[in-house]
Amino acid sequence: MKEQVEKALNSQIQKEGQSSHFYLAMANWAERQGLNGTSSFMYKQSDEERFHMLKLVKFVNERGGRALIPSFEKPQEEFESLMHVFELLLEHEIKVTESINKLVEVCLQEKDYTTHNFIQWYLAEQLEEEAQARTILDKAKLVGEDKAGLYLFDRDLENSAIQIQPANTVNPET
Ligand code: OFO
């Protein structure tokens, strides 16, 4: 595996793991607020990000590279509100998309078409996750500070009523 590609993939491994950590902190905060739907949703998001990290680790090793298990920054523990959580979620996903785009650029510069092909899955995933985060944030904005609205929002999130199912449903075996 080319050095630059390996470096970029290891950097992405760190970002996916950091995302998992960040979302775990959000789940933990939501659980403490009694927002069980939001907390279930964020625990699930955290698991998905960990899966994204593992998928990269395996890919690097299978292609003869050396995956590095990263350390993570301590995520913030407190959030101002439910809306704040979803604002940060969207902001974070936008940054991850930028990072995946940079990874694509490195693959093309290095003419590593196998990795380029592998990364397409992440691009599709980011599209879905950004759309999902936008939808939920729009709903959170509509609800604002209304207590009854917050209750329904959280309950709907628990029942997945306002989640968008990815078109290419994630299969951990692929
Ligand atoms: Fe890893 O899928 Fe978003 O961040």
Image: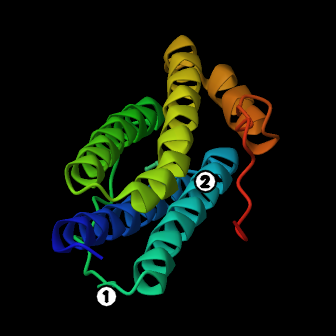
Tell me residue 122's x, y (percent): 49, 49
- Determine the residue positioned at 58% across, 60% down: 48
Q: Residues within 10 Å of mark 1 (few under 14, many from 20)?
A: some
The residue nearer to you, when weighing 151 against 19, is 19
Q: Point out which mark residue 128 bears.
A: none
Quadrant of residue 56 in the image?
bottom left
Tell me residue 70's x, y (percent): 27, 81
The residue nearer to you, when weighing 94 against 9, is 9
- From the viewer's perspective, tell me whether residue 34 is left or right of residue 117: right
Tell me residue 86's x, y (percent): 45, 35
SS type, badge 1: loop
* Residue, disc 2: 39
Label 2 CB sits under 8 Å from any ligand 1 atom: no
Mark 2 or mark 1, earlier in chain: 2
Figure quadrant of the C terminus: bottom right
* Residue, disc 1: 66
